[in-house]
Image: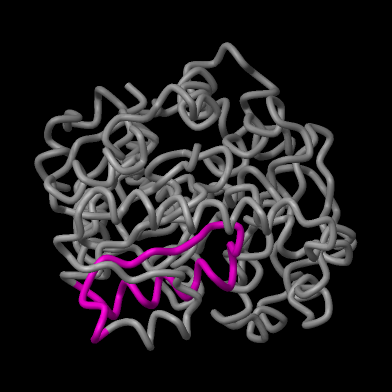
Amino acid sequence: MTNVLLTTDSTDLQTRVHQAAGGSCIAVPSHPLPSDPAQLLAHVQHQALPDVLVLDATRAPHDALALAGRFDRELPGTGLVLIGDPEALSIAAMRVGVRDVLPEHVDVETLRAALLRVGQAVQTRRAQPDVPPAVANTMIAPGRVLTVLSPKGGAGKTTLATNLAVGLAQSAPGAVVLVDLDVQFGDVATALNIEPEYALDDVLQGHVLRDPIALKTRLTQHSSGLLVVCAPDTPAAADSVTPEQVSELLASLSAQFRYVVVDTAAGLEPRTLAALDHTTDPVLLTTFDVAGARGLRKEVATLRELGMLTNARQVLLNFADPKAGLSVSDVEATIRTKVDLTIPISRSVTASLNTGVPIVLQRPKDPVAKQMRKLITFYAETGARRANGRHRAAA
């Protein structure tokens, strides 16, 4: 049976494709259409790629063609079909690897025949013994990219990123990589008490990025089973790290690992924006004060305007203190969105950072560790969170 992923805002088209696919179809909204295949796949949490991706190009044909082109280059294990004007789109679609362009009001039988034809072609290609390794590796859906963001420093991004990554690595050893993208003053190595042989600037050398085996040899291993890309040793070395290199690195890592956790610098500098192009799950962090909440409100508004705020986002409130003169509802009113998880203030976090042992390992019964575990469980149990392309909050 051909598994179909459909992007559309038309309930009528969704019904027809669902009938044509014999019920084996998952539909997600097409507006706004993500530019990154990983972002689209994050909505449905596929363990393997769909056989056929049907893109509704009636509303934004250029965006649909751009996404189709990236699927063909990065994930050639999926067949591509466009819904739109065949006369206007066929030549451009052919150039980006689309196998068929069907008119907007195509009937169910024509759809069924097209899906069957494209699906069979995909299965035949996958079954060939001489399929190149680069193609074979893309038969599995790319990993999730969890990027920790905050508009200001001192919000606890590194604590959150390291504990989240270590917790995920405990349940999936060797399948999680943490990238310290605070390229000037990153503290991931200190927080994990590791001394890397290679840092981010070493990993980003051209030949390393293009060779998956060489890339893995540049990663630093933590005792939890987590693999780490640490920040450069000096701020001067960080100047050589470009947004384009960051984009290429995350594309490569997400093709090889189930989870890629990214710790970022404060704000939305160019390298962070490059990471957001590959991010499936933004993790937005604010502090329990008015300045932090107002900063996050601006960041959320900016990400929404840029089309980078996916449905899989989580909003976290750090250093929650009932004596601070604020309530969670006050923060929610300021940032104009729901807080998914509150993390209490705790001296144990400072001790954990000073010793280089994540609090989920050092003091698992601490209130902060318990809240971290909720977030870890939220991301680890992907199969339980699928509902119309939206994720449940982590309570």
| Left or right of residue 216, residue 251 in this image | left
Q: Is residue 332 visible?
A: yes
Residue at coordinates 69% horizontally, 48% vertically from top-left? 257
Colour scheme employed for the rendering of this structure: one colour
Specify whether 185 is left or right of 227.
Answer: left
Residue 154 visible, this angle: no
Instruction: Find residue 226 and report its image quarter.
Output: top right
Q: Using the image as rendered, state which of residue 2 and residue 61 is in the foreground.
A: 2
Where residue 186 sits in the image (x, y, percent)?
Answer: 63, 61
Q: Quadrant of the C terminus?
A: top left
- Report x, y in % for residue 252: 68, 64
Indicate yes or no whether the magenta region holds residue 80: yes
Residue 153: x, y in percent?
Answer: 43, 58
**The stretch drawn in magenta includes residue 41:** no
Residue 333 pos. (x, y %): 9, 40
Q: Is residue 55 above or below residue 101?
A: above
Vertical position of residue 380 compared to residue 198: above or below:
above
User: What residue lies at 40% left-to-right and 28% top-to-bottom?
Assistant: 343
Q: Which quadrant of the figure has residue 93? A: bottom left
The stretch of residues the image draws in magenta is: 60-88
Determine whether 318 is above or below 133 in the image.
above
The residue lying at 66 percent from left, 77 percent from top is 235
Viewer-side residue, 122 vs 299: 122
**Closest to the observer, 60 or 167:** 60
